[in-house]
Amino acid sequence: MSLLIKGGRVIDPASGVDARLDVLTKDGKIAAMDRRLEAPGTRTVDASGLVVAPGFVDIHVHLREPGIEHAETIESGTRAAAAGGFTAVCCMPNTIPVNDSAQVTGFIVDRAQRTGSVRVHPIGAISKGSGGKRLADIGAMRAAGAVAISDDGLPVMDSGLMRRAMKYAASFGLTVIDHCEDLNLSAGGDIHEGVQSMRLGLGGIPGCSEDVMVARDLILAADTGARVHIAHISTAASIEMVRQAKRLGLPVTAEVTPHHFALTDEHLPGYDSNYKMRPPLRANADIEAAIAGLLDGTIDCIATDHAPHTGHTKMQEFERCPFGVTGLETALALALKVLYHTGRTSLGKLVSLFTDSASRCLGLPHGRIRRGGPADLTLFSTERGWSYDVSRTLSKSRNSPFDGWEFRGGPVATIVGGEIVWTAEAGIRAV
Ligand SMILES: [Zn+2]
């Protein structure tokens, strides 16, 4: 099977390419890339007016399978990923059971091969059951396909355990993805501790609950030499610590979610649980720090932390409903809105935050367009107007704070291994 993608603006930050080029795929791989290609009889995609980028990589999603299939499955979650322009996702281990063994890792790899629209890389747990007491079987999970370890959703409160996890991870060449939160400081909190939490009478989660853990784990990274990736960074102080750590040469990377650079706690319309996530939406100074961090390379990538919950569980009172929002389908549009259409950054830099730079955080083989490499491509528009209607989401859950938002630009087609797995016009699996 071949595809000829004609007339698009090819942006491949890893190789410095930004030019109007045709791209020919063959047998799932990039066969040729040139100013004008002809391939009679080959299915042609008109990409004029569109950007042709390496397939987007989201290194932080929750696919909820096994165990929480009413909220999401690998099938539905990867459909939503494809609709967001993502060709590869890394899924967090807080399923039921927790992905803390080679068996669960293997199950996810197998399910993804059978039912996934995009590539899926499992992330193994740091501790058994993510209980924070005993290390999970890290070597066996790696052998079964785990690309990193994390207890995401929960922090590793025990510093000794975290240190040992980092030593193990370093010996296996795995990155530790770090959910930074001191539960003694955040306990009972629902939203960012500030004027809003006081006004609404909700428990506050202070910024320092994140900062003390970032500080601890940067110290442990220096001690162990492990590669540490700070998940969903959300405070100005944490971002500044990562900046300093990078200056000192520590192998640390960081991600920010679209909701953390697009919304503040001021946007919270009362007790709407679609705005409840961990870490919480922070203050304006934190958003500005996140954007500055993305622009100067302190923050390496944008990751969605797509966290589906069914309407049923999200409908409970604010204090009782679970944390987390969906995000795969709106990530690119939010990045275009906040970073590109405001003139803050170039398209090349923006593409890099979703591709090669994201891939590098975990040492994944994705995020670039090269001859002979897999034909994973994201076609997107910077201009097409659309609005997000969450009732039409491909995810099984609808807990997005961006329902009804008007956007300028977004994904148009997603190609995995030379196959069009999603297009904006025809929905999933239009061929
Ligand atoms: Zn998460």
Image (cartoon, grey):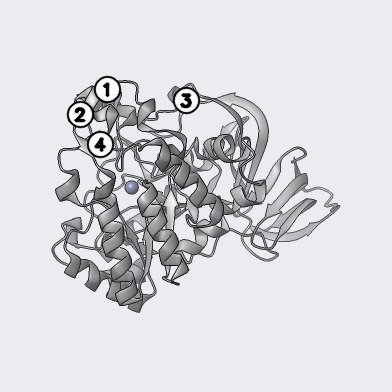
* Residue matched to label 1: 271
Whether tag 3 and tag 1 are in contact, CB under 8 A, the answer is no
Residue occupying image coordinates x 28% and y 50%: 210
Residue occupying image coordinates x 70% and y 64%: 371
Q: Residue furthest bottom?
A: 171
- Is the residue marked by circle 3 packed among few (<14), some (14-19), or many (20+) residues within 10 Å? few
Disc 2/disc 4 C-alpha distance (Å): 9 Å
- Name which of mark 2 and mark 4 comes first in the sequence: 4
Helix, strand, or loop for circle 1? loop
Q: Is residue 137 left or right of residue 333?
A: left
Q: Is residue 266 above or below residue 47?
A: above
* Residue matched to label 4: 193
Q: Could you tell me the amino acid type at mark 2?
A: Leu
- Name which of mark 1 and mark 4 comes first in the sequence: 4
* Residue matched to label 2: 202
Circle 1 or circle 4, nearest the eye = 4
